[in-house]
Amino acid sequence: MKVKKALRPEITFIIGQPSSGKSEIAKNLIRTQNASYIDASDIKLGNDEQSVKLLSSRLDSLRVGQKVIVEDFPRNANEALLFSKNYQPPIKCI
């Protein structure tokens, strides 16, 4: 299990209220860190477990060690807990 987690991307979550500057922060990080980007607002399913599963699947499709900026995730404490437990904790949360 530790080996699989070591091969996963480095994740930074950007969370905040609408119009709080999340997208601007994401654009700057993508440019300066040569990172991929996932807008989690596109991932809206029926429940937290489905959202975590879909995001995890998208992250697993990235190359080993890729840095990735995930905007608008987690949307609640349960998603954060499920993601950290079932995938991995993020490197940063802004």
Image (cartoon, rainbow, N blue to C red):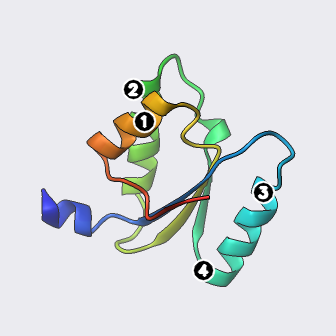
The location of residue 44, given as percent across then percent down, is 60, 28
Q: Is residue 65 above or below residue 93?
A: below
Mark 2 = which residue?
49
Mark 2: amino acid: Glu
Q: Residue at x 43, y 54 (%)?
A: 59
Whichever of labels 4 and 3 marks the residue nearer the N terminus, that label is 3
The image shows residue 27, relative to residue 93, as above or below, that is below
Q: Is residue 37 left or right of residue 19?
A: left
Q: Quadrant of residue 3?
A: bottom left
Per the rendering, the mark at residue 26 is none
Position of 24 with respect to 68 (left or right) is right
Q: CA distance from mark 1 to mark 3?
A: 21 Å
Q: Which residue is denoted by mark 1 in the rendering? A: 52
- Disc 3 marks which residue? 23
Tell me the residue that label 4 is attached to.
34
What kind of residue is marked 3? Ser
Q: Quadrant of residue 29?
A: bottom right
Labels 1 & 4 near each other (Cβ < 8 A): no
Q: CA distance from mark 1 to mark 4?
A: 24 Å
Given contact means CB atoms under 8 Å apart, are the residues at marks 1 and 2 in contact? yes
Q: Secondary structure at mark 1?
A: helix
Residue type for callout 1: Val
- Cα distance, mark 3 to mark 2? 25 Å
- Element type at marker 3? helix
- Are the residues flagged by discs 1 and 3 in contact, CB closer than 8 Å? no
Instruction: Give the x, y percent position of residue 60.
Output: 36, 55
Front tag of 4 and 3: 3
Crowd class of label 1 (few under 14; some 14 to 19; many from 20; radius 10 Å)? many
Residue type, mark 4 in image = Asn
Among the two numbered marks 3 and 2 on one chain, the one whose residue lies closer to the N terminus: 3
